[in-house]
Image: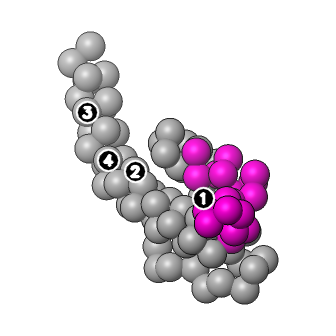
Amino acid sequence: MKRLALALLALAVTTAPALADDARYCGELSELALRYLGKFSHGRNIPDMDVAVAVDQCQRGNYAVGIPHLEQKLRANGFTLPAR
């Protein structure tokens, strides 16, 4: 039982920095996509539905879904992605 607890603790310690990096990267992608891939309507920049869903996934911590969608949208529109 002690070994299991230690293994889980080691796993949590090694994945925490990766999750923080994913959160930062997903936030940067979200900011770019929201700023530049929307349509102006009544003075507001409204993102397309794919961007809105991907940003929502990032905000919920589901980086594995949000990041690839945002990367694809930004690349398809000629953007260079931020460093990961």
Mark nearer the N terminus (1 vs 4): 4
Badge 1 amino acid: Ile
Badge 4 amino acid: Ala
Mark 3: secondary structure: helix
Name the mark nearer the viewer: 1 or 2.
Answer: 1
Q: How is the image coloured?
A: one colour
Asked whether, in this view, residue 19 is left or right of residue 50, the answer is left
Q: Quadrant of residue 50?
A: bottom right
Mark nearer the N terminus (1 vs 2): 2
The residue drawn where x is 40% and y is 50% is 19
Do the CB atoms of the residues marked 2 and 4 lie less than 8 Å apart? yes
Mark nearer the N terminus (4 vs 3): 3
Find disc 2 in the rendering and name its residue.
19
Point out residue 45 in the picture as x, y percentages from the top left corner: 63, 65
Do the CB atoms of the residues marked 1 and 4 lie less than 8 Å apart? no
Residue range of the region highlighted in magenta in the rendering: 37-56
Find disc 1 in the rendering and name its residue.
67
Mark 1: secondary structure: helix
The residue drawn where x is 47% and y is 79% is 83
For the residues labelled 2 and 4, the Cα–Cα distance comes to 5 Å
User: Few, some or many C-alpha atoms within 10 Å of disc 2 (few <14, some 14-19, many ≥20)?
Assistant: few
For the residues labelled 4 and 3, the Cα–Cα distance comes to 11 Å
The residue drawn where x is 58% and y is 45% is 56
Find disc 4 in the rendering and name its residue.
16
Name the mark nearer the viewer: 4 or 3.
Answer: 4
Name the mark nearer the viewer: 3 or 2.
Answer: 2
Q: Quadrant of residue 29?
A: bottom right
The residue drawn where x is 72% and y is 86% is 78
Q: Quadrant of residue 8?
A: top left
Q: Which mark is residue 9?
A: 3
